[in-house]
Amino acid sequence: MLVITDALHSLLEQRKKMWAFLHEPAPRLRWVDLSVDTMDADEFLPVPWNLFADKAPLLTEFRMDRYKFWTDASWIPNLCDVTFYSDFHPSEALEAVQRMPRLQYLDVSIGIGTVDYRGPVITLPRLKTPGLHARDFVNAGTFLQRIAPSADRCLYLRVYRHEPLPVPGEYEEYEATAAKHIIPYFSLNPPSVVTFIVDDVISSFYGDCSFVRRRTPKPQVFGISFHTLFLPSSLLMKQISTSKCFSQVTELHLRTASDWDFLAPPFDFDQLKLATILSAFSSLKTFSTIDEILHSLLKEPTTTTTLFPGLTTLQVYEPSKPGAPAKEPPHQRFLAFRKAIGRPLSVFKMSFRSTPYVRMNEVYNLDYLEVEHAGLLVKWKIIEDPLSGMEEYLRCY
């Protein structure tokens, strides 16, 4: 293993010496993972066709940020794990991928440009986890069309915020293509934990640990993005529901983009028809969400009554402050709602970013639970110091 620390203030000649090994043959090199974040990288990095003097016969894993490697290099067919950054035109990435029969892990940031690859559909018999990151649904769908689907392959496909709206016909084609990859996989590998992130433009489902990037072992984590405007009428979402893809999910984390990105705009959940979407989660035991989402669900009592027949645990992030009946926060009304329909919850969890424990009962008065919800186990977590982790307290009523 080679570790390099490159100070940005180093003289160019020093940097050329430091990175000279990239110009030399590497007969024993097995993996490369480099990030070169400097404007003058072209001054000391080798031209693509001279990387490792085109002699790295044992190289199987390659990630090099901000560097467009030569896709005709002699070591390309040996790769089992490769990352393409957005420097590559989408068609260039596809041309290279078809020359990688051993590929198991593929990560592509689909670059700018129309996917005009005209070769045959690419069959990758060993591919386990293709990860695609796209700026729009059209390129995401057309790129994915060029890769043959497989039922034992876990697709991670993320589309980022994009304007303007996709054309309906093109968006439907994107969903139809994605369905060929994810529905067969779900039929063999039904998830048990799902994260659902919604915002005003893009809404996405992810599998367990979808935000954790581990080198070894690589997690097989699915991900699929929808345009929020089309989600209520989505044919792919209907397929997921009717094929019972989420019927074995026992834990659902439903959040908003603003929980992760403070700059994200507020979102009107009423337009999403959440209760209908959530009917796919028929085996749910734990529901983690926020008060705004509970408020939206309570506006659809007829459908919400049928949701989550086996639900035992509700977890709320940064819950609203309890008050008088006229000002009851959504989580309080949801607990009462579940009790009224004969499906009371057993555990109620709250998570706070920072609230001193000594003030907990002053700020979030929980005394009402003693009267309204006898036998309920209440837990709360407080992040007093991001470096010290979470502290948990509990109380039985």
Image: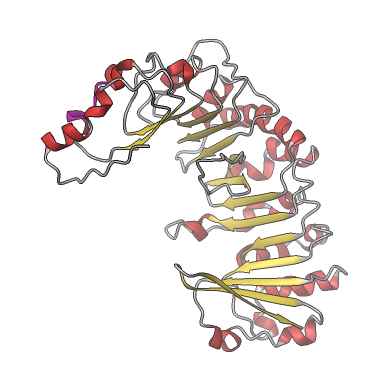
Residue 85 visible:
no
Left or right: 244 with respect to 125? right
Count of marks, rendered view: 0
Q: Is residue 320 above or below residue 370?
A: above
In reply to whether residue 38 is colored magenta, the answer given is no
Image quadrant in which you'd find residue 230: top right
Q: As drawn, is 238 to the left or to the right of 157?
A: right
Q: Is residue 182 visible?
A: yes
Over which residues does the magenta segment extend?
42-47
Q: Note whether 154 is above or below 313 in the view shown.
A: above
Specify the principal SS of the magenta part: loop
Up-down relation of residue 152 to residue 36 (above or below): above
Q: Position of residue 129 (x, y in %)?
A: 58, 32
**Residue nearer the viewer, 35 or 175:** 35
**Furthest-right residue in this view:** 342
Q: Position of residue 293 (x, y in %)?
A: 64, 62
Q: Position of residue 49 (x, y in %)?
A: 29, 16
- Image height check: is 149 above or below 360? above
**Res 344 quadrant in image:** bottom right
Residue at left 38%, top 25%?
88
Q: Which part of the image, by quadrant, shows the N terminus?
A: top left
Q: Which of 271 and 150 lies nearest the eye of the viewer?
A: 150
Q: Could you tell me which quadrant the C terminus lies in?
A: bottom right
Residue at x 21%, y 37% (from the top left corner): 39
- The residue at the point 70 percent across, 88 percent down is 367
- Can you tell which quarter of the image residue 309 is in? bottom right
The image shows residue 56 at horizontal and vertical percentages of: 37, 20
Residue drawn at (48%, 70%) of the image: 388
Q: How is the image coloured?
A: secondary structure
